[in-house]
Image: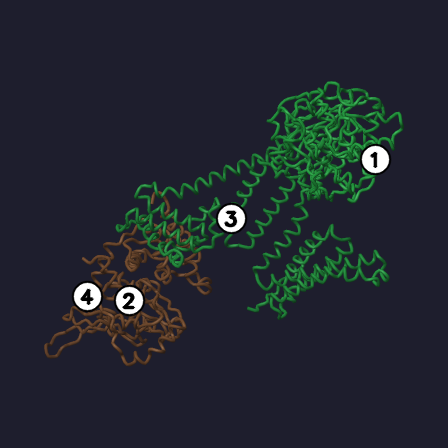
């Protein structure tokens, strides 16, 4: 079979263009323009020469091995060259990088494409592989989700969004257009069998419509609950320290008890995943350069760490679950000239166990999610938010409303005397005499001492210590925010200042830019210490570490933040004036209606399919030869055998004889009942024949074929 | 009367016996036996030396003459030549000097199975006498009509290529033949088998397949005619196909009504051979070409290029598909 049909130049060129485009799509982001050019040239060369190469004698396995070896060489080439001193000496450092990129990507593209091309032109099946590779190359550039928030690519989604079109619809439209194009292409290809292709294509369309409907109804897959700093609910050990201080009272709070996790390597894979979007409705500039969103507070000392309190009256400014109605927060700080009233809208994009709001929330009102497929939950928050001020000196520590038990709880410290001595040492060394008894000054001093002396790293090594805080504070002082917060809180308590650890999110002020929306990402999870000042509420005492071992975080996606903000605001006519609201709404309903119709059609089709399958057992004896035969044909069609147009029923049965020998007598029974035979078998026998014929044919067909056929709602249309 | 199963057994006996003698011609043998059962005649179109004579001879030998008194042999062969006279076929009236009376001397047409070899080589006069015998099962000589046997079966042959000095049969006469069978070359295996057994056959080894009685065949014909049901839809389909062919611009003259009448027993016979007591669309599908292809006069341009088969398939296709789907209807 060495009939090398010469394919037309148009086909060769078209294929080469496709492969080059796919190569460019893959290499776009990986290398510079020269590397891309080289990769494109490699791919083009391989695509054009592939047909010729395929005629060379080496067998396919050898070609593959050669291809893998070549690709490996291309990948290793860089370390061969860059590490040698002679290369930079000749090309210069930048030139070396560009040159290696050119060689690496050019060779890689050439080897991969030519292996694909040779395989495809030798064995027809492998052209599927080639097609799949091209499809994946293109799809991968479109499939990225911008961390599950808005679909890629930016050019498309941002363009769509500024025109108040949901980017999902644009991508769906592109997909539908591709589907239609492919569909007609395959119609052309199959020529004589176009009717069958039409049926299959329509079935595929209906199935994908149903999938889409399910997807749209249930919403896109939501991000998991951010692991954050708080161990997720299920994992918290059920019997946490009974001996942790005199926590009487509420036993039922036990199972809600949460604690901050100390981990050796605190890093999650999807840190840039947005978890919430906050829309500011009032001007606000944060006091410390960060927006703090408190979700949990930990103030009860358990012997090794601070955990959520069990005593009534402690941390009553923190809600442990989402409110059902507008809820004013008890004992929230009042709005003063040092705390401004700031209204925000919070829309959650990931599951959370309790609400959080801009420090410090005074009222939380749930509201309908502006887009349930994107935002799981939304609520309005009114906060009394601190603004930059220095007028906090001279305040007394602790709140006057506290009972002595509560105050004692907020002052509980480890028995370790080193805390006390270190705290005293810091205060006496850094503060002037007159400020040494001022709680605010002491807190500031301790936090800044921590910032100067400790090193920030997410790869800490204290988790296995019995007292991780002490291990950190009196050890290498390398840790992350949980260590910092605990240290500050415990040092403050040692100085007799009521304090606690709060956890939630902290977002840098600059991230918000000029817009009114602020996107909170998973990496913003943070823990900090807070100190209670009478008349001021809980104040954030955060540490700004001077030394950090971690690389600086990447910039946030501003466009995404802006788009999400517009979505959260429920403002569909983002870029436009508010004209024409009604038509846009009815336009938005069109896809849903279309999908519902598709689902209905699908349901009806499955109904018919099921009916035809069941009816033989209910039909009158006169009808049995007809309906039983039809049911058998349906099931055989599902296995991929159908009567051709010019085929008689008998010759079809004859063709099926190797697969379903019972088909011939069944056909005779059926035709006999239609054309007046007097020698018909009893119904039971006909039913048995029908069952036998269908079962044996399905057993002989490949499993996937039968499974697909069984799912196909239109399979019965091919039954003639 | 015979039942259908016995009729089928009779046909199968004949078929098996001929198949044992003639290799690689099973489809032709099927049609020939079918025609015998349907009381029609067959025109074989093939090159010389392709087993036509052997086929006809074996058929004739397979029939046991159970009426020895009538002096009619099982098998006769007539080799047609241009110089023949009708009396060479039908027989002559001769004057018997001893009795001073004219008596009729039967020609070779008086036999159960007659092989009319190269029927297109003889003059129209002879042809027409042969064809009268075929249509009426009688011959008229000197105004006296002599009946032929009830089981009178003609296998005529003609060479499709060697047309020099021939008198092609006119359409009206071709119409008398139930089937025209165009034989194709035998397969390689069959040809090898023929070579391998050539020696034995020259020695004339006895064919030990059982033979059948003349009377059995006549009975079987009656049973087929009486017991096999032809549904009205099938008849309607036949008529529609014939009308469709007549209306087709490529066809100058379509199939006659007689052709349809003759086709019915053939369809019934095929059903019986298949073990059924009813005619199905598949029977129509299988027999359309042998029944109709020689009955159409095509417009000259089409006749050169494609012949009748594509036109028949073309016209009959939708009607057959309709018939095939008819059985799935609720009203069926």
Q: Chain of mark 4?
A: B
Q: Position of residue B93 (x, y in %)?
A: 18, 73
Query: Is residue A61 left or right of A600 when viewed as pictured?
Result: right
Q: Nearer the viewer, mark 4 or mark 3?
A: 3
Q: Position of residue B283 (x, y in %)?
A: 34, 57
Can you see residue A456? Answer: no
Q: CA distance from mark 3 to mark 1?
A: 72 Å
* Residue A324 picture quarter: top right
Instruction: Depth check: give the residue in front, A7 or B268.
Output: A7
Q: Which residue does the numbered mark 4 point to in the structure image?
A: B147
Looking at the image, tell me whether mark 3 or mark 1 is earlier in sequence order.
3
Residue density around tag 1, few if under 14, some if 14–19, many if 20 or more, within 10 Å:
some
Q: CA distance from mark 4 to mark 2?
A: 28 Å
Q: Which mark is residue A449?
A: 1
Q: Which residue does the numbered mark 2 point to in the structure image?
A: B15
Q: Nearer the viewer, mark 4 or mark 1?
A: 1
Which residue is painted at 82% across and 59% down in the image? A96
Q: Position of residue A396 (x, y in %)?
A: 80, 21
Q: Which residue does the numbered mark 3 point to in the structure image?
A: A200
Q: Nearer the viewer, mark 2 or mark 1?
A: 1
Instruction: Depth check: give the residue in front, A713 or A436.
Output: A436
Residue density around tag 2, few if under 14, some if 14–19, many if 20 or more, within 10 Å:
many
Residue density around tag 3, few if under 14, some if 14–19, many if 20 or more, within 10 Å:
many
Label 3 with label 2: CB-CB less than 8 Å: no
Helix, strand or loop for disc 1: helix
Helix, strand or loop for disc 4: strand
A560 w.r.t. A325: above or below: below
Chain depicted in brown: B
Can you see residue A23? Answer: yes
Chain depicted in green: A
């Amino acid at each position: 079979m060495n009939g090398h049909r010469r394919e037309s130049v148009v086909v060769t060129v078209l294929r080469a263009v496709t492969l080059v485009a796919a190569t460019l799509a893959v290499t776009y982001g990986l290398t510079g323009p020269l590397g891309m050019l080289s990769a494109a040239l490699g791919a083009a060369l391989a695509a054009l020469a592939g047909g010729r190469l395929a005629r060379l004698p080496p067998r396919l396995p050898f070609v593959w091995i050669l291809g893998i070896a070549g690709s490996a060489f291309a990948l290793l080439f860089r370390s061969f060259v860059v590490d040698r001193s002679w290369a930079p000496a000749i090309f210069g450092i930048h030139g070396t990088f560009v040159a290696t990129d050119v060689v690496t990507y050019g060779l890689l593209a050439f080897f991969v494409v030519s292996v694909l091309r040779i395989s495809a032109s030798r064995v027809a099946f492998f052209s599927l592989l080639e097609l799949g590779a091209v499809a994946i190359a293109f799809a991968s550039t479109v499939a990225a989700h911008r961390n599950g928030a808005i679909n890629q690519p930016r050019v498309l989604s941002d363009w769509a969004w500024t025109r108040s079109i949901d980017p999902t619809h644009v991508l769906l439209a592109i997909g539908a257009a591709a589907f239609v194009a492919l569909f007609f292409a395959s119609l052309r290809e199959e020529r004589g069998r176009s009717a069958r292709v039409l049926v299959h294509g329509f079935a595929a369309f209906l199935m994908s419509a149903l999938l889409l409907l399910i997807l749209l109804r249930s919403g896109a897959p939501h991000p998991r609950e951010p692991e954050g700093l708080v161990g997720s609910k299920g994992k918290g050990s059920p019997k946490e320290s009974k001996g942790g201080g005199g926590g009487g009272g509420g036993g039922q709070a036990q199972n809600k008890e949460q604690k901050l996790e100390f981990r050796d390597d605190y890093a999650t894979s999807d840190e840039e995943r947005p978890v919430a979007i906050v829309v500011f409705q009032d001007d606000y500039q944060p006091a410390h350069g960060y927006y703090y969103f408190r979700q949990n507070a930990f103030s009860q000392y358990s012997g090794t760490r601070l955990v959520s309190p069990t005593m009534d009256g402690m941390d009553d400014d923190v809600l442990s679950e989402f409110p059902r109605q507008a809820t004013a927060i008890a004992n929230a700080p009042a709005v003063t000239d040092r705390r401004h009233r700031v209204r925000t809208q919070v829309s959650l994009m990931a599951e959370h166990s309790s609400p959080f709001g801009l420090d410090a929330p005074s009222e939380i009102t749930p509201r309908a999610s502006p887009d349930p497929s994107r935002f799981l939950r939304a609520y309005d928050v009114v906060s009394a938010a601190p603004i930059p001020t220095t007028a906090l000196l001279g305040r007394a520590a602790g709140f006057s409303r506290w009972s002595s038990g509560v105050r004692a709880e907020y002052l509980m410290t480890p028995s370790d005397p080193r805390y006390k001595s270190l705290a005293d040492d810091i205060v006496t060394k850094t503060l002037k005499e007159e400020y040494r008894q001022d709680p605010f000054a002491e807190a500031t001093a301790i936090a800044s001492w921590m910032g100067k002396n400790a090193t920030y790293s997410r790869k800490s090594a204290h988790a296995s210590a019995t007292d991780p805080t002490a291990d950190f504070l009196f050890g290498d002082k390398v840790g992350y925010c949980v260590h910092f917060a605990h240290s500050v809180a415990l040092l403050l308590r040692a100085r007799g200042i009521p304090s606690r650890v709060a956890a939630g999110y902290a977002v840098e002020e600059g991230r918000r830019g000029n817009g009114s929306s602020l996107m909170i990402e998973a990496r913003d999870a943070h823990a900090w210490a807070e100190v209670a000042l009478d008349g001021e509420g809980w104040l954030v005492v955060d540490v700004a570490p001077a030394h950090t071992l971690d690389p600086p975080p990447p910039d946030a996606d501003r466009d995404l933040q802006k788009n999400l903000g517009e979505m959260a605001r429920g403002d569909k006519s983002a870029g436009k004036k508010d004209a024409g609201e009604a038509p846009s709404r009815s336009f938005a309903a069109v896809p849903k209606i279309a999908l519902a119709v598709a689902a209905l059609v699908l349901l009806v089709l499955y109904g018919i399919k099921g009916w035809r399958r069941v009816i033989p057992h209910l039909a009158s004896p006169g009808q049995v030869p007809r309906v039983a035969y039809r049911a058998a044909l349906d099931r055989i069609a599902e296995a991929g055998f159908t009567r051709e147009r010019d085929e008689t029923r008998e010759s079809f049965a004859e063709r099926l004889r190797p697969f379903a020998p019972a088909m011939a007598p069944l056909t005779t029974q059926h035709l006999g009942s239609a054309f007046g035979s007097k020698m018909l078998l009893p119904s039971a026998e006909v039913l048995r024949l029908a069952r036998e014929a269908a079962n044996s044919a399905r057993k002989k067909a490949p499993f996937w074929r039968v499974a697909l056929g069984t799912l196909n709602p239109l399979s019965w249309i091919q039954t003639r | 009367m015979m039942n259908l199963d016995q009729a089928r057994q009779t046909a199968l006996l004949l078929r098996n016996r001929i198949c044992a003698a003639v290799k690689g011609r099973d489809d032709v043998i099927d049609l020939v036996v079918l025609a015998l059962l349907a009381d029609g005649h067959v025109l074989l179109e093939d090159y010389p030396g392709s087993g036509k004579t052997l086929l006809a001879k074996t058929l004739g030998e397979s029939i046991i003459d159970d009426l020895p008194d009538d002096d009619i042999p099982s098998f006769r062969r007539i080799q047609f030549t241009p110089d023949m006279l009708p009396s060479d076929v039908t027989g002559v009236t001769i004057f018997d000097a001893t009795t001073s009376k004219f008596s009729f001397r039967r020609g070779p047409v008086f036999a159960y199975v007659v092989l009319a070899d190269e029927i297109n080589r003889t003059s129209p006069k002879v042809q027409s006498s042969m064809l009268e015998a075929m249509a009426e099962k009688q011959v008229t000589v000197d105004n006296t009509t002599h009946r032929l046997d009830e089981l009178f079966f003609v296998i005529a042959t003609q060479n499709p290529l060697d047309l020099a000095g021939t008198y092609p049969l006119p359409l009206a006469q071709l119409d008398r033949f139930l089937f025209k069978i165009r034989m194709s070359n035998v397969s390689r295996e069959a040809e090898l088998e023929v070579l391998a057994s050539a020696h034995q056959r020259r020695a004339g080894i006895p064919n030990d397949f059982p033979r059948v009685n003349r009377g059995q065949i006549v009975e079987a014909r009656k049973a087929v005619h009486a017991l096999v049901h032809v549904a009205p839809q099938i008849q309607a389909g036949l008529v529609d196909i014939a009308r469709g062919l007549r209306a087709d611009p490529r066809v100058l003259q379509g199939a006659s009504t007689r052709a349809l009448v003759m086709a019915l027993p053939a369809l019934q016979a095929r059903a019986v051979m298949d073990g059924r007591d009813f005619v199905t669309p598949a029977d129509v599908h299988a027999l359309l070409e042998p029944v109709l292809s020689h009955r159409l006069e095509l417009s000259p341009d089409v006749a050169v290029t494609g012949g009748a088969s594509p036109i028949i398939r073309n016209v009959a296709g939708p009607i057959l598909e309709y018939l095939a789907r008819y059985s799935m209807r609720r009203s069926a």
